[in-house]
Amino acid sequence: MKQIRILFTLIIILFLNIFFLNTVTAEEAPKRVVLKNGIVLLLQERHSIPTVIFNLKIKAGSIYEPDELAGLANLTAELLTEGTKNRTAKQISEEIDFVGGSISIGANADYAEASLSILKKDINLGLELLSDVLMNPAFDEKELERLRSQTLAEILNQKDDPGVIASKAFSKILYLKHPYWRPVDGLEDTLPKIKKDDIVNFYKKYYRPNNTIMAVVGDITQDEAVSLIEKHFGKWEKAKVSLPKIPPPPKLTNKNVELIDKDLTQATIHLGHVGISRKNPDFYTIAVMNYILGGGGFSSRLVEDIRDNQGLAYSVHSGFDARLYEGPFKVTMQTKNENASKAINAILKHIEDIRTSPVKDSELNDAKSYIVGSFPLRLDTNSKMAGLLSLIEFYDLGLNYFTEYPKKINAVTKEDILKAAKKYLDPKNYLLVVVAKQKEAGIAK
Amino acid sequence: MFLLKKNLTAVIIVLITIILSSQPAFAKKVEEFVLSNGLKIIAVEEHKAPTVTFQVWYKVGSRNEATGKTGLSHLLEHLMFKGTQKYGKGEFSKIVAKNGGNENAFTSRDYTAYFEVFSSDRIHLSLDLESDRMTNLLIDEKEFQLERNVVKEERRMRTDDEPTSLVVEELYAMAFKVHPYHSPVIGWMSDIDSITRNDLYSHYKKYYVPNNATIVVVGDFDTKTLMPRIKEYFEGIPKGEAPVKISVKEPEQLGERRTTLHKEAQLPFVFIGYHTPNIGNKDEFALEVVSNILSAGKSSRLYQDIVYEKQLALYAGGDYDRIAADPSLFYFYGGLKPGKTTKELEDALYAEIEKLKTEPVTDRELQKSKNQVEASFIFAQDSIFYQAMQIGQIETIGIGYKYLDAYVDNIRRVTKDDIMRVARTYFTEKNRTVGILIPVKSNGKGQ
């Protein structure tokens, strides 16, 4: 999914896990309904404000596009709102803007995602527009050309962002032929090759109701939601969808170093290897382990050492990006060029430490109490709840997730963490990408 | 301008105008108390979920900083996490985290704010922790040295390696010659270097006094039981000397100012600012509607004309920086597409500005803009944090939260004539400052 990067100092940067509060406590459990044409609906009533949020996940991510047409999934998703058989792009935006609502559609590696935010009183209009863009896209040649040129310009613009440069290089080297190597927005040499027919075919193949999950959260009863969705999406025809099976990504068998030279004051460091899929049963152990290592806000080992005790970085973070297939494990940070080697050594030491000695009881308890205690804060606003519900369905986690999640976190032991750290972290066979003024950074290959 | 202390996981980026064109429901009861030491408390009960946000807003920001010591308020904000006698370095954050809470802080030109969000049964932790650091902060020399390095890394990341941020910084520095809005919140690099531990400590002692702060608490609590507890924790903190009011006035601009910045970059960027009045001025609502008509949604004028039709820019907008203690800017911006010139983009922006001055906006545009403001007002009520933040901002810059009650009505009253009038009054050539990023390829030559 693309987001234009307008990083003025006039912008507030807000953290997803901090803002907006809501909770499922004292709330009826969400309901799952499968419509005749196969749409899986997840419904959560919340009547405190007169708004309704829809979040759709369609199994039409970039992993299903061919290498030579990288960018196809994203272009298809983004073209949906750029004109239908009934409305021009401008009519779509004009109608939704007029009522203060919003519709957006984009893709990532695993799925395409559509969302609609609308006032309750305008729900019919909102669903009319959402169903129109999903069911009747025009894929007009002129819109395709415009979006292609826009995407190419965005790719060019990203070359000023050391984080994006590092991230793209990291995926490319790490995943080799596995589709996670490809940037979702495509490549400068593949985008020009994408033809309207490719888009129409991709759309026909994957944009099907039986390949779609739809979560609805807000001021609407379950019955009302079902009947409105049947009314607007009932004519969407189901078809057999075969999702290609993708072999697991290759594992690194040695240390790889990629140094990218750029005239910057800071070195942007990405260090890691292949991680886990979301369905991995060790996910919960890894969540606790990673919180202690570098995922846990102000309280992680990496932050305490690298930021608080050494003053080397403003931001240092580790994360497992658990996806449909094994997503990357990565530590990311920025430090001034001259400190790059020092910082890299510190990262490696912490990875080694957590693999060789058990975490302290206090670390384990603090991690668990944060992860469990802040769980309600992550169910957040209606839009976050909608996003989470469709994600639970997408990864087949079951609607007992809300009660199971805290239990599974609480069950994690020190031994589990040590075992998981040994199995899922590797301080020898890793990939290191550094974007920096290399002369100043002086990193040994 | 805002700077947040931490930069951790996934971020969402929200323009100030989005937040502030939306507002909390003031059908809800807002209660106000002032303790004997001058500390103001604003409480809004919101029982839809068992959570609460507790925020402390200090009336100090880069606006209160002297030449040579810019960045002082922001650096102090970082040190506020480095310990008191009672809670040592890092303990504040550890206590909040192990209680399942989130916390952070941010500094702007006009204020510095600290907040926690918790399950409602944990609110006593905020009372204890925030009252402690309001008056008992220790600033250890070694911690200060380390944290200064962290802030320098923050500056490198946000500004020095980010060409568009540099243009914005340059433009404000040029548009404001006299007023402290001249300087960035994070401070100039050499100023960050020259700040001492004692500078920070005197800044803390001067501004972190109860009579210079406002507590905003929103969420699931009972005001009757909470107020005595707030008193218990905060009322013992001695009142300080009232900080001297800043009364610097930026003189009228008498001609266009222009700055160019040559920096390694892929694409040019244009940023244009016009001096405009701030919140509290009669023209603010019309200017806010102008901003919506120009930039809210893909059907807005600048997107339609510049991004969609002419395909001059990757993105373009016009935003009104009105939530400020003193007059600031209405700014236009755009990032160019390859092969287009900054002149083409500037001309297209000026053409849109001329259109505002000479042709009335359509009925539908005006209505759309009002609908958008109202809808975002309703959507924003999903978040107790935003509700508290709006109250905190408005209070701290001296307007008073009651302003929010009438906000939507004031927007509804804006007419087509108002829009033409404010466009003619403020969007003039002599009132304009233009900043241009000229990309330099790595060999040092311009495009």
Image: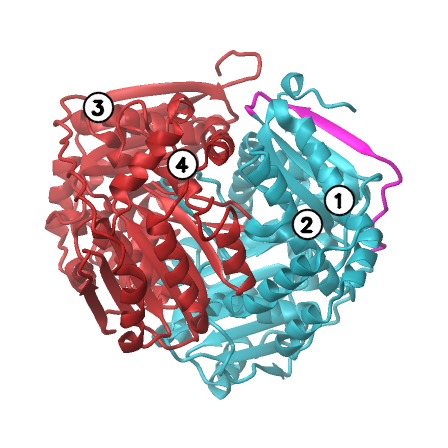
Mark 4 crowd level (few <14, some 14–19, many ≥20, 10 Å Cα): many
Residue A293 marker: 2
In the rendered structure, which amino acid carries the disc numbered 4? Leu
Q: Nearer the viewer, residue A97 or A19?
A: A19
Chain ID for label 2? Answer: A
* Kind of element beneath mark 1: helix
Q: Nearer the viewer, residue B317 or B128?
A: B128
Q: Disc 1 marks which residue?
A: A351
Q: Disc 3 marks which residue?
A: B177
Mark 3 on the same chain as mark 4: yes
Chain ID for label 3? Answer: B
Q: Quadrant of residue A55?
A: bottom right
In the rendered structure, which amino acid carries the disc numbered 1? Ile
Toward the front, the furthest residue is: B85
Mark 1 on the same chain as mark 2: yes
Residue A408 locus on image (x, y percent): 70, 72
In the rendered structure, which amino acid carries the disc numbered 3? Lys
Reply above or below: B97 against B268: below
In the rendered image, what is the letter of the chain coloured red?
B
Alpha-carbon span between mark 3 and mark 1: 50 Å
B315 within the magenta span: no
Of tags 3 and 1, the one toward the viewer is 1
Exactly how many numbered labels are in the figure? 4
Mark 3 on the same chain as mark 1: no
In the rendered image, what is the letter of the chain coloured cyan?
A
On screen, residue A237 versus residue B258, left or right, reads: right
Instruction: Tell me which segment is drawn in magenta.
Output: A246-265
